[in-house]
Amino acid sequence: MDTDVLVVGAGPTGMTLAGELLTAGASTVLVDRLPRRSDLSKAGGVQSRTLEAFDQRGLLEPLLATGDHPVSTGHFAGIPLPDQPGRHHLPWRSVPQVVIEELLERHLAARGVHIRRNHDLVGLAQDDAGVTDAGVADAGVTANAVTDAGVTATFADGTTVRSRYLVAADGAHSTVRSLLRAAFPGEPGTLTIIAADVRLGGADPSASHTWTEDGHWAALFPLGTDPEGRPLRRLVLGGPGQSLPRETPVTEDDIRRGLRTVFGTQTHLLELRYARRITNASRQIERYRHGRVFLAGDAAHVHLPLGAQGMNTGIQDAFNLGWKLGAAVRGRAPAGLLDTYHAERHPAGAAVLRNVRAQSLLMDWAGTREPDVLAAREIFTDLARLPDVRRHLAGLMSGMATRYPMPGSELHPLVGLPAPDLDLGASGRVHELLRSGRGLLLDPAGTYAQAVVPWSDRVDRVGEAGLAGSDTGTGAEPMLIRPDGYVCWAGAGGARPEPALAHWFGDPR
Ligand SMILES: Cc1cc2nc3c(=O)[nH]c(=O)nc-3n(C[C@H](O)[C@H](O)[C@H](O)COP(=O)(O)OP(=O)(O)OC[C@H]3O[C@@H](n4cnc5c(N)ncnc54)[C@H](O)[C@@H]3O)c2cc1C
């Protein structure tokens, strides 16, 4: 084996995953076909759950220190969502994707992982027939069964890398997905819109989304500032006549014309930094696992970039998969653990595709101005004034309401959701304690000190002594938290944690 896990693609998904693998004690090789990091502007919005996950790895402070990243309410179909859930409320931030990628690359380099660039994957072969036909069980990859079986990846220059597992984080046009001939069902693109990073002059349109009577529209989002401190905006343009083939270059004239059509002469273009056409294709891979190969990020799901979902979803895929692969290569994975990646992340991806479709309809991105669509939007806008509706939508968009099934635990309001970032006084915050990449048992009444001993090489415990001075004291709920920050057991009602410990952390023997 050259490495435990080969990660193909050094976008935000691949780099997050490489970091998670290191944290979980797996060796990793991260490759990308590009000679250098792309400076194309893509994502601009980072959701609460991503910010929390970064906090759980000590990356939040360095991220916020990279510049002035405006806080925003986030939105659903352009309707602002002021109520972001989460105990410590990390609101949506506007952070350009390039900044996130720079940070992740820097942190990987500091931990000794340097992206192998100019590595264009062109072939792969799995040599373990038991697991190639995918997805159903962990056949051959059960607890403590680390074998020599693996995957051989071939690159355009003829070199190869052999690994126990391979993760495809190679983006929307994934080569790995094609090589696997993996089903990627969904709808093809039916329209394109323009996305551009701009500096604007003249009157600053106050609404983030503006339509004209005849269906032209523009959407504007903050993108921080340029090095001279001047505000940058993400401009999205669509409507009749805009929908040209994706490959058609976008000119300054296209942008000027679009601005004039929607805003008249009051707003004008000062600088065009970057522009592209994007389609509304909406697809999700049928199986996130194909034997020893896993797909994550845009390689597994594509949709319109609406409401800051794509990069955030890919980063969450990576947080979900990293610790599981780490457990597998260290021989600690309980049977079925690797299959929970598909079981948890496929529904989460499907929910994202659904919310993006609904947003696209309500925003009338096709510019139809159909009365039915306009009526639906009006009613939806009214509904979104209700605090409960806003909270529901904010949970959906921020990733905070993504709930995983947690066998091994009784039903409980905390179980399956991200752990609250409780302040545990002298012990620190829950998110800080998760930085070790280990599981965490909060045991405020000191009931489970013995129960956790057999797993003490992979699960930390904070008991009553560690809670002195905390904001909840010994009244906090006992709970078991997975390394990705999700509560997998909560002990109200006297239920014992051992079944959940065994289910998620394996056989202690
Ligand atoms: C205009 C726009 C705005 C967006 N806004 C947002 C937003 O606000 N919030 C949000 O969450 N998302 C947003 N997105 C989506 C987001 O940019 C993507 O979801 C994100 O880049 C996906 O990350 P990834 O790492 O999965 O894939 P990518 O970023 O596409 O990275 C894939 C990497 O794989 C490499 N690769 C490909 N093929 C091979 C191969 N054969 N061998 C080796 N390497 C290979 C590529 O070179 C690339 O570096 C936006 C997208 C666009 C276009």
Image: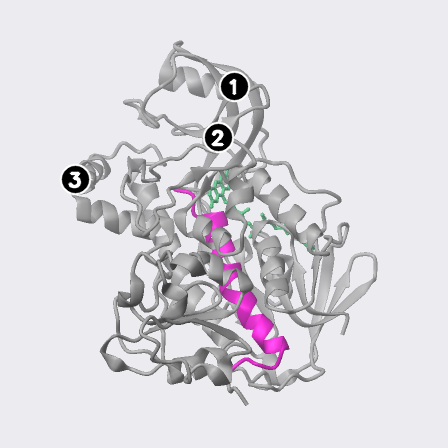
Mark 2 — residue?
223
- Secondary structure beneath disc 3? helix
**Which residue in the structure is indicated by mark 1?**
230
Instruction: Tell me the kind of residue under disc 1.
Output: Arg
Q: Where is residue 223 shown, x and y percent of the image?
A: 48, 30
Give the class, few, some or many, for how many residues have Cα within 10 Å of label 2's Cα (few <14, many ≥20): many
- Secondary structure type for disc 2: strand
Per the image, the residue denoted by label 3 is 379
Picture quadrant of residue 217: top left
Residue 458: which disc? none
Is 431 above or below relative to 251? Answer: below
Assess disc 3: are there few (<14), some (14-19) or many (≥20) residues with their C-alpha within 10 Å of its C-alpha: few
- Select label 3 or label 1 by which is in front: 1
Position of residue 438 in the picture relative to residue 264 (left or right)? right
Residue 186 in the magenta stretch? The answer is no
Main SS of the magenta segment? helix
Is 329 colored magenta in this rendering? yes
Q: Earlier in the sequence, mark 1 or mark 2?
A: 2
Tell me which segment is drawn in magenta: 307-334
Q: How is the image coloured?
A: one colour
109 or 300: nearer the eye? 109
User: Which corner quadrant of the image does residue 16 belong to?
Assistant: bottom right
